[in-house]
Image (tube, helix red, strand yellow):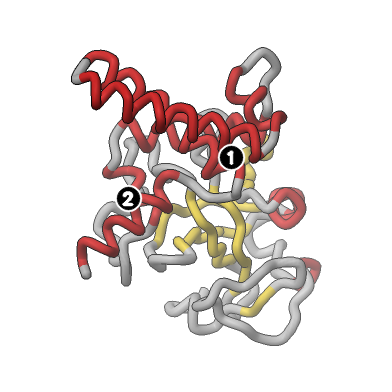
Amino acid sequence: MSDSLATHANAIPGTTPAPRAVAGPALLPESLDWDKGDGLLPAIVQDADSLQVLMLGYMDRNALQATLTKRLVTFYSRSKQRLWTKGETSGHVLELVGVGTDCDSDALLVLARPRGPTCHLQRASCFPNSPAVAQSPAAVATDMGFLGELDALVAGRARERPEGSYTTRLFEAGVRRIAQKVGEEGVETALAGVSQNDEQLLGESADLVYHLTVLLHARGLSLADAVEVLALRHRG
């Protein structure tokens, strides 16, 4: 394996390169050296925005194909002996941006945008000391505490649409209806502030934040994205 995986990576057709993603000659998954690791390749996942290393997993052919097809990073779990999509339980998925291989074709570099903390310890990365060129939206979400959990929960509802969920009903009603709810909650929050009823103000504020989060995800964005804008403005 190359000691500088990013330097020697080659794009696999079917993936969308990030602005910093490396490019190279087209490479088919069949040309990878699957035999060296008994059908498994180590897959290093890197944040496509901050370039921070997030985690290490292993992929077999089916996991790589599932990753490319679903656009969600999927591994082969050696302990569970099955395919495992990162975040399938927590909702903290890794949205695929691009996949590359090293110069020996025996390791993968996966560029992804995390939705929530990648590590099961609620950290942005399983390697907490790995450097980043900038703070990613996922790191911002991790710093957000429960709001980060809410962001991930709403993202999960947007994907899975569980029956009986109020959030599911909102998503199925469409962006216009969700935007209307945000407007209603915004007015109610303002009225609660004018009436100087603190308990009501807190309740309406909570409703506003929730519906705003749903609206952001309905547009393919996230609460973490909005918080990142605030952070960038603060940093000037």
The answer to whether 125 is drawn above or below residue 174 in the figure is: below
Q: Give me the disc on residue 78.
A: 1
**Residue 202 visible, this angle:** yes
Q: Quadrant of the C terminus?
A: bottom left
Viewer-proximal residue among 17 and 104: 17
Q: Amino acid at mark 2?
A: Val
Q: Residue 63 at what x, y percent from top left?
A: 70, 49
Viewer-proximal residue among 64 and 187: 187
Q: Give me the disc on residue 148.
A: none
Q: Amino acid at mark 1?
A: Arg
The answer to whether 173 is drawn above or below residue 223 in the figure is: above
Q: CA distance from mark 2 to mark 1?
A: 31 Å
Q: What is the number of callouts on the image?
A: 2
Q: Residues within 10 Å of mark 1 (few under 14, many from 20)?
A: few
Q: Quadrant of residue 232?
A: bottom left
Disc 2 or disc 1, which is closer to the eye? 2
Q: Residue at x 62, y 83 (%)?
A: 23
Q: Is residue 106 left or right of residue 148?
A: right
Viewer-proximal residue among 119 and 146: 146
Whichever of labels 2 and 1 marks the residue nearer the N terminus, that label is: 1
- Mark 2, residue position: 140
Q: Residue at x 62, y 66 (%)?
A: 98
SS state under label 2: helix
Q: Quadrant of residue 158?
A: top right
**Residue 152 visible, this angle:** no
The answer to whether 75 is drawn above or below residue 89 in the figure is: below
